[in-house]
Image (spheres, rainbow, N blue to C red):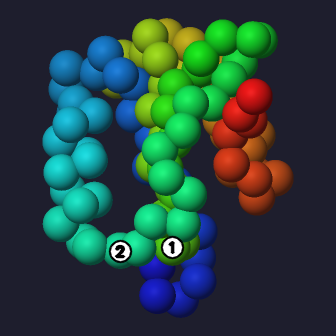
C-alpha cells in the first residue's frame, strides 16, 4: 500500500468462512486514515452492499453473498469489480 498500489478487499455479508466483522477488525488494526466513510452502494436500485475507502485501500461488502461472492451475487460482483477496474468506488445514489 505504501507504493501507491490500490488494494480492494471485499466480503460477502453472509460469509461464515471469513465474516465481515473479522475483516473490519483486521483493517482497523492497521490504523490507516479513512478517506470516504462507510456508505451504501447500489445495484439495480437496491443496496448492493457497503463500502469504506481508506488511503490506498477500499473495503467493500456485498449484500446477500457468501464466501464465493460471484457465485452468490454475480450482478453485484460485476458492478463491484467494474468499479475497481475503472478506478472508482461502487455507485451510490
Q: Position of residue 62 (x, y in %)?
A: 49, 25
| In the rendered image, the vertical position of residue 77 relative to residue 28, given as above or below | above
Q: Is residue 69 left or right of residue 36?
A: left
User: What residue is shown with label 1?
Assistant: 55
Position of 86 with respect to 61 (left or right) is right
First in sequence: mark 2 or mark 1? 2
Q: Is residue 84 above or below residue 4?
A: above
Which element carries disc 1, helix, strand or loop?
Answer: loop
Q: Which mark is residue 21?
A: none
Residue found 35% across the figure and 22% down from its top: 13
| Residue 5 visible, this angle | yes
At a point 71% along the width and 18% down the height, the residue shown is 43
Q: Nearer the viewer, residue 64 or 66?
A: 64
Q: Nearer the viewer, residue 63 or 66?
A: 63
Location of residue 56 (image quadrant): bottom right
Helix, strand or loop for disc 2: loop
- Expressed as whole percent of the image width and height from the top left, the position of residue 87 reads 76, 58
Q: Kindly indicate the quadrant of the structure image that contains residue 47.
A: top right
* Residues marked 2 and 1 touching at CB (< 8 Å): yes
Residue 85: x, y in percent?
A: 76, 52
Image-based side of 22 in relation to 73, left or right = left
Q: Which residue is denoted by mark 2 in the rendering?
A: 32
Q: Position of residue 75 (x, y in %)?
A: 69, 16
Q: Nearer the viewer, residue 58 or 52?
A: 52
Of residue 86 and residue 37, the one placed in the foreground of this image is 37
Amino acid at each position: 500500500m505504501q507504493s501507491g498500489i490500490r488494494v480492494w478487499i471485499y466480503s460477502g455479508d453472509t460469509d461464515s468462512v471469513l465474516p465481515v466483522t473479522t475483516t473490519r477488525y483486521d483493517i482497523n488494526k492497521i490504523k490507516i486514515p479513512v478517506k470516504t466513510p462507510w456508505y451504501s452502494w447500489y445495484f439495480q436500485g437496491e443496496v448492493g452492499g457497503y463500502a469504506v475507502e481508506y488511503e490506498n485501500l477500499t473495503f467493500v461488502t456485498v449484500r446477500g453473498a457468501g464466501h464465493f461472492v460471484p457465485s452468490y451475487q454475480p450482478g453485484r460482483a460485476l458492478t463491484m469489480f467494474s468499479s475497481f477496474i475503472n478506478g472508482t468506488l461502487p455507485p451510490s445514489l
